[in-house]
Amino acid sequence: MHERREILTESGGRELCGFFFAGKGKMQSLETYVINLDGSNDRLEAISAQLTDFGISFERISAVDGRPLDLSTVADYDEAHAERYMGRSLVGGEIGCYHSHLKVAERFLQSGARYALVLEDDALPLCNPVELLEKALPDLDAIDPEWLLINIGNSKLKIATPLSHYNTGGYQCELVAAHYFPMTTSAIVWSREGARLFIEQHGKIFAPVDNYFRHWLTRTGHGYSFTPAPVTTTEAASQILASAGRGRKTNKRKWFYGLTKQRRLMQDKFIAFIQKKRFRSVQAPR
């Protein structure tokens, strides 16, 4: 059985967001959200078709458009800290992307769901992500009841501990403890505690949201991933990350940008190696 699902938009209207499938294959405690910029209808239709094929309902979250922002007026952006940590200032698209993920985390916590699958609208599932999570989340809850976030959209894992293998519709992947948390936020999975802490600990933005997740979860642990990733991305360029005429990689780089980046990477990797050693000692008796 399936029925069309409508949600209220921020303007009070109703928006059709694909289909709601009941019964078989539906994880009742998991909500799926798609971050989509207003007016990006082609991208919404593309990911809607992908998820509908898998029988997955979702709620559209209107992305925060940071492109026109005057960053000097953004109260929670700390440019000086960004320059110290990143070696450059941020662009409006990065602020918008960060705020979009805060927005969807808040929406998730308003629901009664136990988990949230969050997809940006350029995500491209390689298997049914809900079916995979139905298998993997009970295992992860048993291994680490305090887990916070799973990155399911990046296979580039450098410092990780293998945990369990899964086969979903012929697609095979492995759940790992991602001590050096992978970048990109095209496809992530929140626990309620993870989303709560993300919002509760939010103060000043000093890095793009994917860099922040690495900074946070490399230090606290409780971050996980799959390899190979069950979700990749389309060829479409990110719109919420776009900036008016300036690429984020070259935006206002300081003369010490290279040194700052190398120091950040080395520090994160050193911490990740320590976390991996501790994780192994904890998991050894299992």
Image (spheres, helix red, strand yellow):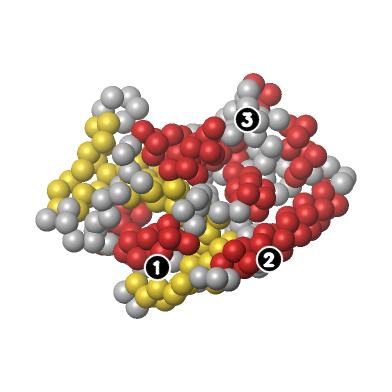
The residue at 85%/52% (across/down) is 259
Label 3 is placed on what type of residue? Gly
Q: Provide the residue designation for mark 3.
A: 203
* Closer to the camera in the image, 253 or 223: 223
Contact flag, marks 1 and 2 (Cβ < 8 Å) = no
Residue corresponding to mark 1:
126
Marks 1 and 2, the one that precedes in the sequence: 1
Quadrant position of residue 108: top left
Label 3 and label 2: CA atoms lie apart by: 31 Å
Q: Seen from this angle, which residue lies furthest right?
A: 255
Residue at image coords 51%, 70%: 286
Please rate how many residues cluster around mark 3, counting C-alpha atoms within 10 Å: few if below 14, some from 14 to 19, many from 20: few
Find residue 8 and report its horizontal and vertical position in percent. 27, 31
Q: Nearer the viewer, mark 1 or mark 3?
A: 3
- Mark 2 is surrounded, within 10 Å at the Cα level, by few (under 14), some (14 to 19) or many (20 or more) other residues, namely few
Residue designated by label 2: 277
Q: CA distance from mark 1 to mark 2?
A: 32 Å
- Disc 3, SS: loop
Nearer-N-terminus badge (3/2): 3
